[in-house]
Image: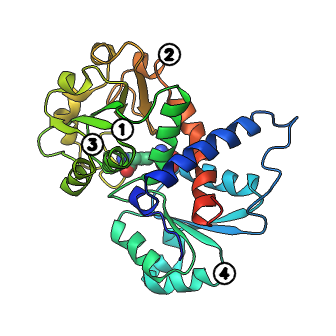
Amino acid sequence: MTRHLLNLADAGGDAIAMMIGDAIDRKAARAEWPKGRPDTDRPLDGRVLAMIFEKNSTRTRVSFDMAMRQLGGTSLVMEGASTQLGRGESVADTARVLSRMVDAIMIRTDDHAKAEEMARHATVPVINGLTDQSHPCQIVADLLTVVERGKALPGLEVAWLGDGNNVLNSVLEAAGLMKFNVRAGTPQGYDPDDAFVSMAREAGASVSLTRDAEEAAAGADVVVTDTWISMGQEHAHNKLAAMAPYQVNARLMACAKPDAIFLHCLPAHIGEEVTEDVFESAQSAVFDEAENRLHAQKSILLWAFGLL
Ligand code: CP
Ligand code: NVA
């Protein structure tokens, strides 16, 4: 059966744990570059990933492209607006055509239903590179970052501050699958999706939603935030005032455990969701997290191709 990754549950907890282990091994092998010969097995030799972008990207685009190259394959980028999708060709027909030419499809879109439609009609793996609903690949990299900093996932206390957005939805999904706990501090009207909260709770994760930023951060092992204005919300400036109490600053980090790490999927808006001192502090793992997109993408691709 074709393996799609629209949300983390498509892979499940065991596969995510395997991805993290594989990514750690591949990252260690790559550290020898250019002296060593990492990824010598070139398991994706000859395979091509098509990447459809209906929204901007730096990390997702470069990490998937480099992951394919380092594993022996290649990728091609399709900017949504310049394809026939941008002129109204159906997602279903696009999926059927691409499936006859490429070996896998990654899609970044403003509408999760489009990614689902793509997967329904594609006969090659479809990977969610961010939708309005979720960002599963980001969270595989985030979990890798947490694990490589010596923190075990089961029982981990994760604090989310700010907007209850697509990234938080995937954090919640991961909490259920990997058995960690989430305390989300978000303003009224900006809660995460109920479906993701319920999914996490039903899977045994403790999820608490609070309006109190300090309560969310208290005793946390990991403090996470994201932009207050996601792509497609550029005119939602009225959000900024509501978000202000949830800024991750030194006072808030002091509520977390002394060895807590700070994560942000990037791009960051210094002075809004995070202050410069926290972003640049020793507790901040944001550039390891960004690098880990590359290592995680390899493991995600190998899983999607049935090679992991
Ligand atoms: N974090 C993330 O997805 O970054 P890009 O938008 O640059 O891909
Ligand atoms: N929540 C952000 C994540 C960017 C990687 C957005 O959707 O724009």
The Cα atoms of the two marked residues, 2 and 4, are separated by: 46 Å
Count every numbered label the image shows and give the total: 4
Residue 205 bears which disc, if any?
3
Residue 283 position (above or below residue 36): above
Is the residue marked 1 within 8 Å of ligand 2, measured from its CB? yes
Q: Amino acid at mark 3?
A: Ala
Return the x and y of residue 294 as percentages of the image width and height.
Answer: 62, 45
- Mark 4 Cα within 10 Å, few/some/many (few <14, many 20+)? few
Taking the spot 49% from the left edge, 70% from the top edge, the residue there is 81
* Mark closest to the chain's N terminus, 3 or 4: 4
Residue 101 bears which disc, if any?
4
* Mark closest to the chain's N terminus, 2 or 1: 1
| Tag 3 secondary structure | loop
Residue 272 position (above or below residue 76): above
* Mark closest to the chain's N terminus, 2 or 4: 4
Taking the spot 48% from the left edge, 19% from the top edge, the residue there is 280
The Cα atoms of the two marked residues, 3 and 4, are separated by: 41 Å
Disc 2 to disc 3: CB gap under 8 Å: no
* Mark closest to the chain's N terminus, 4 or 1: 4
Residue 282 bears which disc, if any?
2
Residue 306 position (above or below residue 98): above
> Who is closer to the viewer here, 181 or 116?
181
> Who is closer to the viewer here, 67 or 275?
67
Residue position for label 1: 226
Q: Amino acid at mark 4?
A: Met
Residue 148 bears which disc, if any?
none
